[in-house]
Image: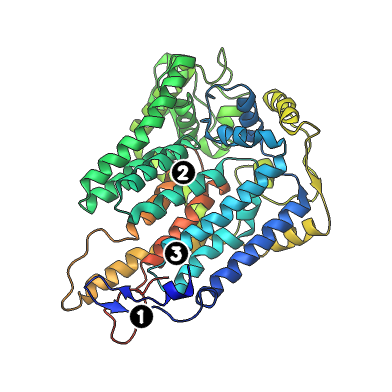
Amino acid sequence: MSEARDAEPAKTGRGHRLPRDPRPWARRHGWFLAVLALGTALRALAMLGYRPALWFPDTYTYVVTVFRPRPDLVRPAGYSMFLKLLEPLHAFAAVTVVQHLLGLATGVLIYRAARRAPRWAATLATVPVLLDAYQIELEHLLVSDTLFMFLVVAAVALCATRRPATVAAIGLLLAAATLTRTVGQPLIVVVAAWFVLRRRFKPAVVLLAAALVPILAYGAWFHATYQRTGLIGANGVFMYARTMSFADCAKMDPPPDLAVLCDPRPPERRPPSQEYIWAKDSPLVLRPGITFTKENDDLAARFATLAITSQPLDYAASVLTELGRTFTWGRPVYPDPEIYAYYQFPVTPPGPPGRYPAQVGAEYAKLYEQGAIGTRIVEPYAGWLRAYQDLARLPGPVLLGVLLVPPVAAIARRRGGRRPGTRPAGAPAWLVPWSVAVVLLVTPAAAAEFDYRYVLPAVPLACLAAALSIRPERRPGSSGRSTGA
């Protein structure tokens, strides 16, 4: 934007105009640009220190889908499609570069979406996504979470629009997020409900229609492949694993066909929930056929339903326990040392994949790279990042405080009363990012288990909501509206 345009007066919304900040654009946004520059430098350090990328067990499944284009039973194919778009470059380094760019773009989107907040609040809202060491490490992992985060933040950032074409874009972005991670499904309902609360019924219908078209198309592809309805074939399996943290067959009294899934050990002696999906001695894994057959998934879903309806209070307590891990000050090892280690910048290169499916994926990864795969650790850059990771992260209680800012500010304003001459507002602007952040935190705790990487996509949205809930500065003679960024 040119300085001449910046100097033009801005509308207040009541027919009056306020002068824009006369300072040059770079000076007005100097603090944010400094944060963005530091975030860029840290990502360059990651590219120098860990070449070309960091690997995760899920990575190999995504790569297999690139070369065998069919829906996966456990994970939707959105991230595999993303990898397919970059395959002509034959470099996982290109994937990590794009993911780091998506992380930076997320920071820009948050700052832009918070333009009605004070600039200091808008800048603070971008700090976790731009500077948190675990966010940077997640971007360097070949997993779907960075892409998912960007798609969701982009959709939320567009929610202030009134243009039908842009509302359709919100629906398409949320559909893409859903096909990247299935936790995106409830977000479509959340954002559509926000439009309804603002009495914008037509945009809500446009959003739902735009979101449903690609989702139904993917569902048709899934059905044609497996003769099953859905986007994945593991919902029942994951809910079964979730309930095994509390399920007591003595209380449930399951029929004989479900009793085979019981674990006689008391809940406090059982492994983390996800082990019931992957461990060789899991009652579900021991059943005939692969774990995710329709028969096994349906059986697991019936067991989970019985467990939840028989022990609703135990289920609620278990969900709250998992959710509570989000807000601890430290970073305890969970769910196990192996998974926990994937979220740390490593000292030594990770070893080759151990399980058979991952070994198959590793062969396809060599085709993708057209050469050897792995991670080369280069000092001193890697060491600098490890030292930075020991210091720079968002503690859980701080995230909880950020989530509490919008409702506390709303209650304080309600008790303080409206200013004379103002009209009551509809759904506040902070409500949609806040609601999306809460859903992103609660859904994994309710349907799977806590995982550190599931928290990070919710953080920028929680920070955006907090920034939007803060009153903008009032200048002499203004009506209280922000003069814009």
Amino acid type at mark 3: Val
Disc 3 designates what residue?
402
Q: Position of residue 178 (x, y in %)?
A: 44, 37
Disc 1 designates what residue?
19
Neighbor class of circle 2 (other Cα within 10 Å; few <14, some 14-19, many 20+) is many
Neighbor class of circle 3 (other Cα within 10 Å; few <14, some 14-19, many 20+) is some
Query: Which of the two residues, 113 or 71, is positioned nearer the viewer here?
Result: 113
Dot 2 or dot 3, earlier in sequence? 3
Amino acid type at mark 1: Pro
- Residue at image x 64%, y 54%? 136
- Residue at image x 83%, y 59%? 380
**In the visual, does 449 lie left or right of 43?**
left
* Pair 2/3: label in front: 3
Dot 3 or dot 1, earlier in sequence? 1
Query: Which of the two residues, 33 or 77, is positioned nearer the viewer here?
Result: 33
Neighbor class of circle 1 (other Cα within 10 Å; few <14, some 14-19, many 20+) is few
* Pair 3/1: label in front: 1
Disc 2 designates what residue?
445
Q: Position of residue 154 (x, y in %)?
A: 45, 50
Q: CA distance from mark 1 to mark 2?
A: 48 Å
- Residue at image x 80%, y 32%? 371
